Amino acid sequence: QVQLQQSGPGLVKPSQTLSLTCAISGDSVSSKSSAWNWIRQSPSRGLEWLGRTYYRSEWYNDYAVSVKGRIIINPDTSKNQFSLQLNSVTPEDTAIYYCARGFDLDHWGQGTPVTVSS
Amino acid sequence: DIVMTQSPDSLAVSLGERATINCKSSQTVLYSGNNKNSLAWYQQKPGQPPKLLISWTSARQSGVPDRFSGSGSGTDFTLTISSLQAEDVAVYYCQQHYSIPLTFGGGTRVEIK
């Protein structure tokens, strides 16, 4: 069965970069029928989709306007995982971050609480 | 962006009674490829990620009890729990998977009366 395992630090300083990884088992990051998403959840913003990466003979990315210019989502085919990089973070980026598969999001990682604080 | 509006914000229902949650999209989410509405429902319990219950408006995921059902058309959708059980206490979210950005409703908290 598909499992997504997240890893990464839970505390990031303001202006620095938030980096998280989502390791995939039971599917392939290169699957031509899947997409790989990052979503965050906070009391102020609710559930907020951040972006996705997917492969359809070449790699594509889509990003939310709210984080465009600060976000990079990269696949790593050698490790069958994908990553989130969010630059220049502020306290408003404090949230629980999730990775998830698909368009309807049928499998989710366990979530990583991230606090942006000095 | 497609805005998803849920109602009510919270709901208290007696055990065994029906719970109904509404979701309205700001524009159509009808996917022409299969003529189905791209609307999903999730259940989230404390400390857990959201769990997909229903996709394409009414398609229950494997293992989801049949007391959960989804319906709707156009821009109005409904999640019904036909006979509320104690384990159904959670927050429920709708989400459109028609277009980017994927967007979610604000959530409906279901409690036992």
Image: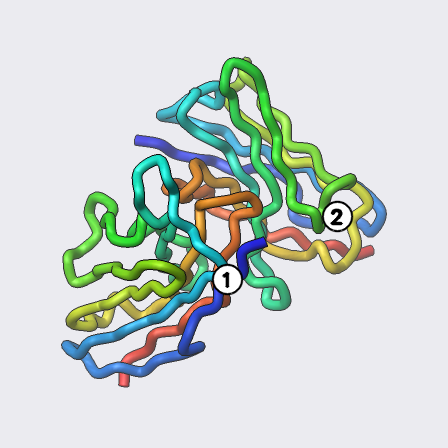
The residue shown at (44%, 77%) is: B9
Identity of the amino acid at label 2?
A: Val
Q: Quadrant of residue B20?
A: bottom left
Indicate left or right for A15 with B15 as reference.
right
The residue shown at (41%, 59%) is: B94
Task: Name the spot of residue A22 as percent of width and height, x first.
Answer: 53, 33
Q: Is residue A26 above or below residue A85?
A: above
Q: Which chain carries label 2?
A: A
Q: In this view, does B36 lie above or below B18?
A: above
The residue shown at (65%, 45%) is: A64
Callout 2 secondary element = strand
Q: Quick one: which residue is furthest to the bottom in this view?
A: B113
Task: Name the spot of residue A118 as percent of width and height, x first.
Answer: 82, 55
Callout 2 environment at 10 Å: few (<14), some (14 to 19), or many (20+)? many
Q: Name the residue under label 1.
A: B26
Indicate left or right for B62 with A70 as reference.
left
Indicate left or right for B79 with A101 as reference.
left
Q: Name the residue under label 2.
A: A12
Are tags 1 and 2 found on a single chain?
no
Callout 1 secondary element = loop
Callout 1 environment at 10 Å: few (<14), some (14 to 19), or many (20+)? few
Which residue is at the front of the view, B88 or A59? A59
Task: Name the spot of residue A67 as percent of width and height, x first.
Answer: 72, 46
Let me know if residue B49 appears in the view: no
Which residue is at the front of the view, A94 or A55? A55
Q: Kindly report the distance in space between the C-alpha atoms of the residues bearing marks 1 and 2.
A: 36 Å
Mark on residue A47? none
Q: In this view, does A87 lie above or below B54?
A: above
Indicate left or right for A90 with B56 as reference.
right
The residue shown at (51%, 21%) is: A55
